[in-house]
Amino acid sequence: MTQRGDINRTGAELELAVRVVELVRAAAGPAAQAEVMVQHDAEALTRFANSMIHQNVADATTTVRLRLHLDGRTAAGSTTITGADGLRGLVDRTIAAVRLSPADPTWPGLVPPTPLRPSAGYHGSGERSGLDFGFDEATARATPAERAERVRDFVRAAGGLETAGFCRTTYNSAAFANSLGHAVEGRAAEAAIDGIARLNGSDGVARQAGGRLADLDGAVLGARAAAKARAAERPVELPPGRYEVVLEPDAVADVLNNLAMFGFNGKGFAQQESFAELETDQFDPSVTIVDEPLGSRDEPAPGLPFDIEGTPRESLVLVRDGTTKAVAHDRRSAAEVGAESTGHGSEMSRTWGPMPTHMRLEASPAPSEAPTAPADRAGPTVESARPLVARMERGLLISDLWYTRVLDQKTLVVTGLTRNGVWLVENGEVTAAVSNMRFTQSYPQALGTGMVLGMGTESVLLPDRWSGVRYAAPAVHLASWNITGNASG
C-alpha cells in the first residue's frame, strides 16, 4: 500500500513545472513552445463487502506532462520520475519525438498569462494561484478510521441486510507553466460513498459525493439502500413499450454522463458528430445544465481551477431554459470552430475530445399544489422525488441505469439496462416491484420540449465511476421512455 499523498506541497508542483520549461528552453532554444502540467493525485479507498471492511488502499502519484511545439510540429510526453534525471529524460525524449512528428498546421498556440477566475469559495486576488478555491483540508487529510465510520453507519442502518461498496477520498494539487510565462496552481479534494444493500437477490443503491467528507452521512445512505432492496423483492414482469417514468438522481447521472461525452464534446461538435446546435431550443424549457468546476456558494470546488493547457476554468452554461448555449472546448477544438477554450483540455481531450466533468442539471421546486405521497406510502423513492411519483397515473420509477452504450452518436440513442430497483406506479402510488428491463432511448429526445413533466426539488451530488468526475442531478419526471425488453428477452 502506497502512503497517502502529502498535502503540504504548496509551490512544489509549480517549481517542477517552471524547471521543465527552463530545461526545454536550454535544450531546444527560445523558439520552442512548451507547456507543462505537474499534478499530484492521491486517492484513498475503504472497500466493504459482506457487510464488513475488507480493504483499505491508498495511492499517491505525481505526474509531469510536457507538450512541445517546435518547427511546426507537436509532441507530448510524461513521466512520474521527478528527479533531475527524470525531468531531463522527459525533455530529451519529447524533443526527439517532435522532430519525428508530422507537421501540425492546427496548433492553437499557448495560453498567455491569464488570471484565474475567482469562485464562490475563493478569497484571494484571482491573479495567481487559486489554492483556496473552497478547498477542504480535512477531507484531504481523511484517515481510514474516518472513512470506516461512514461505512459502519451505512452497514448498521441497513438493518442486517448484506451490504457492499466503498467510501473514497481524493486530493489533487497541480501547477501549470508555459514558455509565455503563464503560471498557475491549485488544489481540490473530494469524498464519495457508493453502496448497495441486498435482500434475496434484490439490490438497493445509495450514492453521494461532495467536497467535504463531513457532509456524507453513511446512516442516511444505508437506510435508503436497504429500503430500496426490501421494496424490490418479488418483482413482476411488464411488457416492452413506452412508459412514463420518474428517473431518480442516480439514473439521471447516466443521462448527464452520455450528454457530456457525446453531446457537449467540443471535438464531436467540431466534426458535426454531436446533436448540439447552439442557440437552438433542443430541450424542454425546464432544462438548465451547467458545468461547475469551481463549485458553488455552499459547495467546495470539485475540480482544479485550470485545465491541462493552463486555461482558467469557470462555470459554463451548456443549456439555459431549454436552449443549447455552449459545448466544452479545449484550445484545439475551439480554434477549429472559431470559439475560445472553455477550460476543458485534458490528457484525454486530444484523442476523445473535451467534455464537461462537473455537470449539474438544475432542480426546480415542485408546484405548491402538487400532491405529495405520505412517507409511509411513498415506497422506495428518495424524498425529493415523491411529488413526481404522486403525479404519475401509470408508469415506472427507475433507480439506476447501467451498461449503457451509444447506438447513434448524432441523435444520442442509447441502449442499456435498469438496475438496483424498478417499480410500477399507479395513481401516484408504488404498487409493485418490476424486474430489470432493457431500454433504447434518445436522451435528448427524452428531455425534449414537452417531454419533461417535472423536476425534483434537489440536485444530489453523485460520483462517477472514476474520481475527478461527478454530477449533480435531481429526480426527473419524463413523459416517455422506450422499454425494449424485459427479463424474458
Image: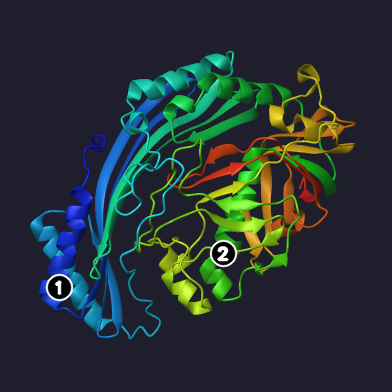
Please, what is the three-letter code of the amino acid marked with disc 2?
A: Val
Who is closer to the viewer here, 45 or 73?
A: 73
Q: Position of residue 57 (x, y in %)?
A: 32, 33
Whether residue 401 is visible, yes or no, is: no
Quadrant assignment, res 325:
bottom right
Q: Secondary structure at mark 2?
A: loop
Question: What amino acid type should be assigned to the residue bearing mark 1?
Answer: Arg
Residue lying at the far front in this picture: please name it.
125
- List the residue tagged with mark 1: 25
Residue 276 falls left or right of residue 56: right
Q: Secondary structure at mark 1?
A: helix
Residue 388: give x, y in percent of width and height.
Answer: 79, 35
Q: Which of the labelled discs sits on residue 327, or is there none? A: 2
When asked about the image quadrant of residue 30, the answer is bottom left
Q: Residue at x 32, y 84 (%)?
A: 102
- Mark 2 or mark 1: which comes first in sequence? 1
